[in-house]
Amino acid sequence: MGRWILVAFLGVAFASVAGDRLVVTGGAQQLEGSAGGGLVPWALIAGYGTRDQVGGSAFVTRVRTNDFDLTAGGLAVGLFDRVELSLARQRFDAGAVVPGLVLRQDIVGAKWRVAGDALYDQDSPWPQVALGLQHKRNRDMAIPEALGAKRGSDTDLYAAFTKLWLAGFAGRNVLANLTVRSTRANQMGLLGFGGDKEDRRRLEAEGSVALMLGDRLAVGAEYRGKPDNLSALREDDFSDVFVAWFPNKRVAVTLAWTRLGSIAGLGGQEGAYLSVQLTD
C-alpha cells in the first residue's frame, strides 16, 4: 500500500496549479483512473482547473469482497478543463481461486470534453459530453489465456454524458451520468480481453446518479454493464451505492458497498469499497 500512497503524493505534486472550479466538479477517480464515480467515468475533467488552469488528482482505492482484494492507484491531469490524461495500476489478489495468484493491469487513459459545461450550462437541457479511451495491458496472462482470453491488451472507447442540476431536487444539487463503452474486457481486463464465447466489441451502458446532501457530502449509486466472453466463467454486471465526503478541495473520501456478482467462478461477490483522492 505504501507505494500507492507515494504515487498519490507525486500526482498531486505534478498537478501544481490550484484550480478554481467548485468542489465536487472534478468527481472522484474511478478504478481505471478516469475522473468520475468509482465504477464509471464521467464527462467531467479531473482536478479543479478552469479553462485557464491545469489541475489534477491522485487516488488509492481498496475493494474487499467475500473472497478477493482489489487495490488500484494512479493519477490524472486535467488540462484547461478540456483534456484529461490518466495513469492507473490495478492489483487483484485471486488467491481464493489459485493460492498465490495475483493479476495486475496497467491503464493509460485520455479524455476530451467535446461539448457542453455541466456547471455553467444550467439553462441548456444538454449535458456535458466527453469522448475517452482507456488502453489496458494485462501483466499476468497465464491464467486468462488458459481460460480462453484472446489477447493481453486492448483499448476501451467510451462516450460520457454528464448533467448537473443546481438545486435540482429539494434544493439539493443533483448529478446524473450516462456512459456508453465499447469493450471486450473480461473483468475490466484483469482476465484479458475477448474469449472463446465472444471476441467482438460490445456496447455496454454505465450510469451514475448523485445527490448532494450539503456542500461537502454526496450520496449516490452506480451501475456498470459488462460483456460475458468466457465460457469457463460467467461475468456479471457491477453496481454500488456510495457516500462521498469532500472536507476541502484537496481531499475526497468515498465509501461504497459494491455488488460485483460472479468473479473467477465464485458467485455473490460483494463488499466494501474505500477510496482516498488528493486533488488540485
Image (cartoon, grey):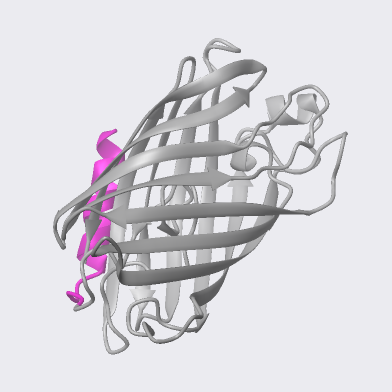
Task: Say which residue appears at 36% left-offset and 82% top-offset.
Answer: 122
Task: Say which residue appears at 79% left-offset and 54% top-offset.
Answer: 201
| Residue 135 image position (x, y, % from top left) | 60, 57
| Residue 140 image position (x, y, % from top left) | 62, 33
| Residue 176 image position (x, y, % from top left) | 45, 61
Task: Say which residue appears at 67% left-offset and 43% top-offset.
Answer: 226
| Residue 188 image position (x, y, % from top left) | 60, 42
Q: In the picture shown, does residue 239 fall above or below 52?
A: above
Residue 279 visible to an observer of this rendering: yes
Q: In the picture shown, does residue 149 fall above or below 184?
A: above
Specify whether 240 is left or right of 25: right
Q: Quadrant of the N terminus?
A: top left
Query: In which quadrant of the rendered view does residue 166 lie?
Result: bottom left
Residue projecting furthest to the right: 197
The range drawn in magenta is: 1-19
Asked whether 8 falls inside the magenta stretch, the response is yes
Q: Relative to the observer, which residue lies in front, 4 or 235?
A: 235
Q: In the picture shown, does residue 205 fall above or below 138?
A: below
Q: In the picture shown, does residue 100 fall above or below 76?
A: above
Q: Main secondary structure of the magenta part?
A: helix
Residue projecting furthest to the left: 248
Residue 44 visible to an observer of this rendering: no
Q: Relative to the observer, which residue lies in front, 219 or 147?
A: 219
Query: In which quadrant of the rendered view does residue 253 lie?
Result: top left
Specify whether 165 is left or right of 67: left
Specify whether 227 is left or right of 205: right
